[in-house]
Amino acid sequence: MNMSFSHDMGDEYEKFIRRMNPPRVVIDNEACKNANVIRVDCANEHGILLEVVQILTDLNLIINKAYISADGNWFMDVFNVTNQDGNKITDEGILDYITKSLGPESCFTSAMGSVGVKQTMDHTEIELTGSDRPGLLSELSAVLKHLKCNVVNAEVWTHNTRAAAVMQVTDEETGTSITDLERLSMIKALLCNVLKGSNKSSLAKTIVSHSVTHTDRRLHQMMFADRDYEQTGDDVLEDRQRPNVDVVNWYDKDYSVVTIRCKDRPKLLFDTVCTLTDMGYVVFHAKIDTEGPESYQEYYIRHIDGSPVKSDAERQRVTQCLEAAIKRRVSEGLKLELCTTDRVGLLSDVTRIFRENSLTVSRAEVTTKDGKAVNTFYVRDASGYPVDAKTIEFIRQVIGQTILKVKGSPEDVKSVSQESPTRFLFGGLFKSRSFVNFSLVRSYS
């Protein structure tokens, strides 16, 4: 049989099933006192759960409870959701938007191959992975500033000595995407040199693309590919801090049962479902209960080939990957928020000030809308000690106290910093600007 013909017939059959059974969305505002109850029924296919969770997460909804059943050709989900303040959603406009986002007229009914993918010519997307070190974001953004690239949006994660970033940049002169192939090649080469640093044998990867995958999902994929889930001496956590992930087989039903107990936080459900999906596992049933400070998640899964977890090595890998997915977005450090008029080099200037004052960025979110830059940074002392309140106050005076605001206190990071006080023992070596300038000169020569 012609495999291409068989694949095309399969696609057409799936499209026919979706047309005959469009998604049905019901929002019940009376069933639960403290939350809106969203019911989603539709034809089942691999990845459909991730798509639904992704849509709800992108709407900044908090999923307190969920019941999932997808055993067979039909998918039935129930979600209890609130707004970010923990209150029931009463705005009819938002409720109508939820219905349309999950309903038959949305992209939700498209083929799963296009989930989370947006085509745009407004900017160029750059994906970066490499070893983490103090001042890395400052060095990368300095290179982009030198190459006349404006960072309009960015998401930066660090975990287990690894770093991953998705940056959306525009040309300084045109304000649009960069299309010159020679210039793109130079950008890739220079950024890759910075990622490698003084260790030219270290693994580093730079990709330039105009196709923008859902950023959070892409970051999980990048860090998974970089094997950040493998344990290192710097990632040893006390039992009370480590997520409790357990994987056992239910032989009577041919399922593997995954249970997760950990501290609750926003987007936790997305992170775990995303990881299971991208590892090739199908969720047939699930129960989620995240009310209160703790989260409990229970998944009944099989591999996409229909088999449960087959070996201890596979079980350990699933456990490690889920632990990593949970910890990647944990915000270690003092939260700083910057709001000001956007300009080329803003990210470079701000992160340089952080670096010159021995602060390292553990996570960052950079957004630009209508000419305004709204950036969030989670910073720690580069040497691993508690952040000095005087240092923060000095930085705010330099940048502007109305521009840079503290969303916590130095005491908030004291316990985190003391977990691994020698992680960046030589952080002070990166306080000078000369390191970035030297990298640029060396790259051009």
Image: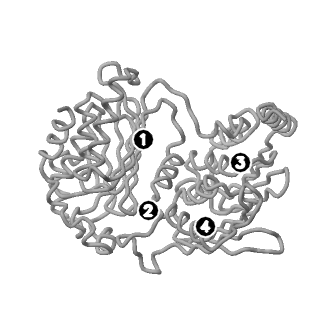
Residue labelled with disc 2 = 330
Name the image quarter holding the C terminus: top left
The residue at the point 76 percent across, 49 percent down is 40
Residue labelled with disc 1 = 127
Residue labelled with disc 4 = 290
- As measured in the structure, the alpha-carbon distance from the residue carrying label 4 to the one carrying label 1 is 32 Å
The residue at the point 33 percent across, 52 percent down is 377
**Residue 100: quarter of image:** top right
- Mark nearest the camera among 4 and 1 is 1
- As measured in the structure, the alpha-carbon distance from the residue carrying label 3 to the one carrying label 1 is 26 Å
In the image, residue 315 sits, relative to residue 281, either above or below, namely below
In the image, residue 266 sits, relative to residue 112, either above or below, namely below
- Residue type for callout 2: Val
Q: Which is more N-terminal, label 1 or label 3? A: 3
**Residue 380 location in percent, x, y?**
27, 62
* Pick the front one: 94 or 39: 39
Alpha-carbon neighbours of circle 2 within 10 Å: few (<14), some, or many (≥20)?
some
- Residue type for callout 3: Ile
**Residue 306 location in percent, x, y?**
77, 59
Q: Which is more N-terminal, label 2 or label 4? A: 4
In the structure shown, which secondary structural element does the residue marked by tag 1 occupy?
strand
Residue labelled with disc 3 = 48
Residue 443, numbered label:
none
Q: Which is more N-terminal, label 3 or label 4? A: 3
Q: Which is more N-terminal, label 1 or label 4? A: 1
Is residue 398 rendered to the left or right of residue 403? Answer: left
**Residue 107: quarter of image:** top right
- As measured in the structure, the alpha-carbon distance from the residue carrying label 4 to the one carrying label 2 is 16 Å
Colouring chosen for the image of the structure: one colour
Alpha-carbon neighbours of circle 4 within 10 Å: few (<14), some, or many (≥20)?
many
